[in-house]
Image: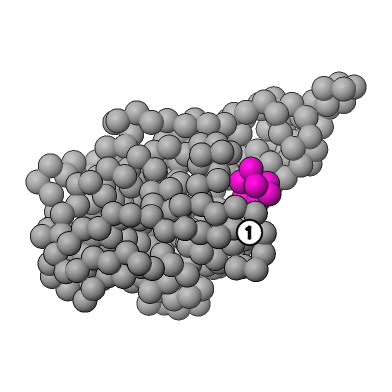
Amino acid sequence: MTLTIGPLRAEPGQKTRGSLPADLGPTTVEVPLILVNGSRPGPRVVITGGVHGGEFIGVDGATRLAGLLEPDDVAGQVVICPVSNPPAVYGGRLNISPLDGVNINRVFPGDKDGGPTDRMAAWLFEYVIDGADAYVDLHSGGIDQHLLDFVGYRLTSDDELDAKNRGMAHAVGYERVIFGTSPDGGNSHAAANRQGIPAILVETGQLGDRDPATVRRLLDGLYRILHHLGVIEAPQHLAPVTVQPRDWIWTGEVESPAAGLWYPDAVTGDEVTEGQTIGRIIDPIDGAEHKIAAVSTGTIIYSMNGLSVRPGTHLAAIATPPRLTGLMPDH
């Protein structure tokens, strides 16, 4: 079948590159798309990078994959959007858009009549994500964030969908596979799940890393996903998996209650207990100190490295193996 998105078309056995305009209200942005229509039938897989600014590995990895995939090697269709949120990628360099200060990965599937970021999210669902048989959203630790590589997925009330989510997540080959207990919320993969689309989040690298070895790690993971989905044969150069993926569960996020300067006492990779002080926010005006406590027990998977924070800034996210909580991913 012909792969069509807006005016962009790719016939079977063809790769098409181009961009489409997204009307965000106060401005219009061009969103790049690469359509790889395989020479044989198979699933449609959508891969997005650049949902957040300052997360370079996903943008680089998606762009490189688009150049490497050839239609003759593909069964099905692969849609790659390496810069999914141009205002944040080119103008913000952080996870919020400079147009309205909104984190797009909290408002999916968006609102076409809303503000700029809501419109961006709605555009991505309408033109890119809808109709997918599988969806992969690429992220990393941004320029202000320490992060341990992980894959995220959600549990839903649909056993078949849960099995597909978990299968994709484990196929990446990363050690940490962290699941959420429901498909609620504005994350891209959760919103896709609510529309019945198997979806995962892949986090690779930290602190705005763009090292080729880190990109290679992500590319290997993407090849494994595409092979798992039956889109490609396993490439001969594919690095073997050296770790056993295991499920973890999110137990809590710590947010800043105030604006100020952040001084952490516990960082990414540290084990913390609920109620433990993990850092302090200092008011630069009067020197007042806000002690910040862990909201749960577990391992810090990602944490804020930046000095300046504002109310709502994510300071840390905590997860633990599910055996410690009694909840397993097949429940």
Judged left or right of residue 204, residue 51 is right
SS at mark 1? loop
Report the side of 212 relative to 42 (left or right): right
Residue 4 appears in the rendering = yes
Q: Position of residue 206 (x, y in %)?
A: 46, 33
Which quadrant of the structure image shows residue 311? Answer: top right
Image quarter for residue 169?
bottom left
Picture quadrant where residue 116 is located = bottom right
> Which residue occupies the foreground of this view, 17 or 264?
17
Q: Answer yes or no: is residue 298 visible.
A: no
Residue at 55%, 54% (x, y): give it. 28
Q: Position of residue 72 (x, y in %)?
A: 10, 60
Q: Quick one: label 1, few (<14), some, or many (20+) residues within 10 Å? A: some
Give the residue displayed 64% in from the left and 43% down from the top: 98
Query: Where is residue 182 drawn, in percent x and y?
Result: 55, 67
Q: Residue furthest right?
A: 286
Is 102 part of what is drawn in magenta?
A: yes
Q: Is residue 155 magenta?
A: no
Q: Is residue 49 above or below residue 40?
A: above
Answer above or below: position of 249 versus 41.
above
According to the picture, the residue beneath numbered tag 1 turns out to be 25
Q: Quadrant of the N terminus?
A: bottom left
- Image: 140 above or below 211: below
Q: Which residues are drawn in magenta?
A: 97-106
Give the dominant element type of the magenta stretch: helix, strand or loop: loop
In this image, 294 relative to 243: left or right?
Answer: right
Left-right relation of 270 to 205: right
- The residue sitting at 50% across, 41% down in the picture is 89
Residue at x-position 61% and y-position 46%: 97
Give the residue type at disc 1: Gly
